[in-house]
Image (cartoon, helix red, strand yellow):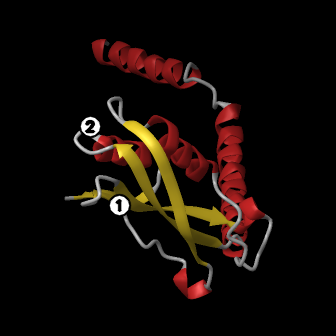
Amino acid sequence: MKAIIYLSIGLLLIIYASSTSPPRNPLAVTSSKIMSSTDEADTKNNDAERDHQEHNITRYITIKFEVFGRVQGVFFRKYTKAKAEELGLTGWCRNTPRGTVQGEFEYALSSAETGTDNGNNTDEESWEAIAFQRWLCRTGSPKSKIDECTFSEKLSSSSSSARTRKYDAFRVIR
């Protein structure tokens, strides 16, 4: 008799457990469909971005500079390197025997920024290049006194084989 009762209780528990199991969540199917459609949209966006980048020619422009005034012994090169890195520029700077600081900096321009596809026009400048030139001429290091600054030889790497940077970082040459 005890066996029948235990068996009955066991069957009742099984029946109860199967009848009270949580219903299948209809959102689970919907969310997986959403995820797959999101993945498809991401793939389409990546393809469109890749096509845009292929037509968006990047060229690198290098500008030489020299800064005159009290620019040696006042950490001018250290601050110049920090400002260039802050702006994402590459290049170098060094002290000269004449008491000036000279160097080169490089920035990237894309055809989307310039509105040209041929890469021959070097009159355009990025906001980073303009900000760096202003900083070199007006601000410098806290203890520097800038009398004059010059910029020359704007060189452009516009050919399709020269789409690589000349410099990989901004360095202080000692």
The residue under the point 47% across, 17% down is 12
Residue type at mark 1 is: Trp
Horizontal side of residue 11 vs 18, given as left or right:
left
Quadrant in which the N terminus appears: top left
Residue neighbourhood size for the residue with mark 2, other residues' Cα within 10 Å, grouped as few (<14), some (14–19), many (≥20): some
Report helix, strand or loop for mark 1.
strand
User: In the rendering, at what x and y percent does residue 125 appear?
Assistant: 65, 58
User: Which residue extends farthest left?
Assistant: 174
Note whether 53 is above or below 134 in the view shown: below
Q: Residue at x 64, y 36 (%)?
A: 28
Q: Which mark is residue 92?
A: 1
On screen, residue 20 versus residue 114, left or right, reads left
- Place of residue 108 in the rendered image (x, y in percent of width and height, measured from the top left): 57, 63
Name which residue lies at 67% across and 75% down.
Answer: 54
In the displayed structure, 129 sits above or below 63; it is above
Q: Earlier in the sequence, mark 1 or mark 2?
A: 2
Estimate the x, y position of residue 86 in percent, counting from the top left.
Answer: 44, 43
Nearest the camera: 106 or 141? 141
Identified at 35% across, 60% down, the residue is 92
Q: Which mark is residue 74?
A: 2
Which of the two marks, 1 or 2, is nearer to us in this view? 2
Q: Tag 2's secondary structure?
A: loop
Task: From this view, report whether residue 68 is shown above or below residue 155.
Answer: above
Q: Nearer the viewer, residue 49 or 75?
A: 75
Mark 2: which amino acid? Answer: Val
Whether tag 1 and tag 2 are in contact, CB under 8 A, the answer is no
Image quarter (top left, top right, bottom left or bottom right) of the C terminus: bottom left
